Amino acid sequence: MHQALVDAIGIPEGDRFQVVTPHDPEELIFDPNYLDVARRDVVCVQITLVAGRPRELKLDLYRQITANLTAVGVRPEDVFVMLAENALDNWSVGNGRAQLVELGTVAGARVEP
């Protein structure tokens, strides 16, 4: 996931804040054929990021995540990706400051400070 974010979105290599939560199969409910995709063992990826990336970057991100997971044995049909976007002022990465507001932008995004 991280390498796809670096390659497709351009996030810094060290911008690595991730939560990996394993679930038993009975804890996940996914339609096995929604939108004509034959799913079996879904790998659900939810990414929270600052809004403003163009559609082309997001589409490339989906392709790269899928390619990277396929390379380690995940079926492409089982890769489910959701993006949750928010504003620069929705982030504090320590010390009670809004560092992204102070920076005014993030890699790949077209955002107003």
Image (spheres, helix red, strand yellow):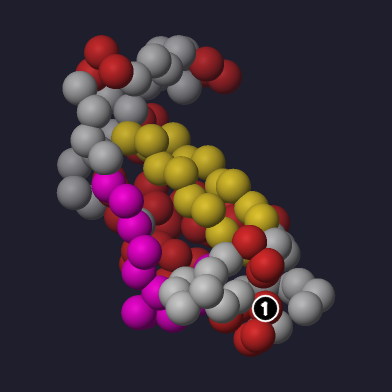
Identity of the residue drawn at 45% across and 13% down: 31
Res 104 → quadrant: bottom right
Identity of the residue drawn at 19% across and 42% down: 73
Identity of the residue drawn at 33% across and 28% down: 42
How far from the left and from the top, in percent, is residue 53?
Answer: 67, 64
Res 24 → quadrant: top left
Identity of the residue drawn at 60% across and 75% down: 98
**Is residue 29 located in the magenta-colored stretch of the structure?**
no
**Circle 1 is placed at which residue position?**
101
Q: Secondary structure at mark 1?
A: helix
Q: Residue furthest bottom?
A: 103
Residue type at numbered disc 1: Val
Residues in magenta? Answer: 9-20
**Is residue 14 located in the magenta-colored stretch of the structure?**
yes
How far from the left and from the top, in percent, is residue 58?
Answer: 59, 56
Name the image quarter holding the N terminus: bottom left
* Of the pair 82 and 38, the residue shown nearer to us: 82
The vertical placement of 5 against 95, above or below, is above
How far from the left and from the top, in percent, is residue 85?
Answer: 64, 53
The answer to whether residue 11 is left or right of residue 19 is right
Decide: few, some or many residues near mark 1? Use Cα within 10 Å; few <14, some 14-19, many ≥20: some
Residue 23 seen in render = yes
* Of the pair 91 and 4, the residue shown nearer to us: 91
